[in-house]
Amino acid sequence: MILEDDSGLRSAIERLCRLSGFKTRSFRSAEEFGASDCASSARCLIVDVQLPGVSGPAFYGTLQLPRPPAVFITAYDGPATRQAVDGFGDHALLTKPFLGAALLGAVNEAMQHGG
């Protein structure tokens, strides 16, 4: 599942994942209809930290345990961002812009280790 408010980046991530053999669903906000249901059953989440409305980490925190593994992405890497993500354990945090290979590596690693 891809949760990213930037439509261009969301489409690029979705295309990259599909070309790599993943089935994807994407959403522009945590409040978008179906996002919570999809996230609960996903094998891995790619979640933007700074979303309009509910932030990526806040959305992730609402998911029932055990939560699927997540790869968080952000344009604003800093102590507050790291603290928000670190609160959920060992998850990848990639700073935009990132290479497609780095994202795929983080997704594969998350899926192998459960987060």
Image (cartoon, helix red, strand yellow):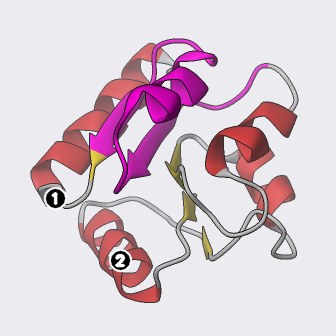
For the point 42% across and 26% down, the residue is 79
Q: Residue at x 37, y 34 (%)?
A: 78
Q: Position of residue 110 (x, y in %)?
A: 41, 27
Please give the range of residues in magenta.
Answer: 66-94
Would residue 63 be seen by someone viewing this image from the given angle? no
User: Which disc number belongs to residue 70?
Assistant: none
Quarter of the figure that contains the N terminus: bottom right
The residue beneath circle 2 is 9
Disc 1 target residue: 100
Of residue 20 and residue 3, the one placed in the foreground of this image is 3
Viewer-closest of 78 and 90? 78
75 relative to 83, above or below: below
Q: Amino acid at mark 1?
A: Gly
Residue at horizontal 77 percent and vertical 20 percent from the top: 66
- Spot occupied by residue 59 in the image (x, y as percentages of width and height): 76, 46
The residue sitting at 58% across, 40% down in the picture is: 43
Is 62 one of the magenta-colored residues?
no
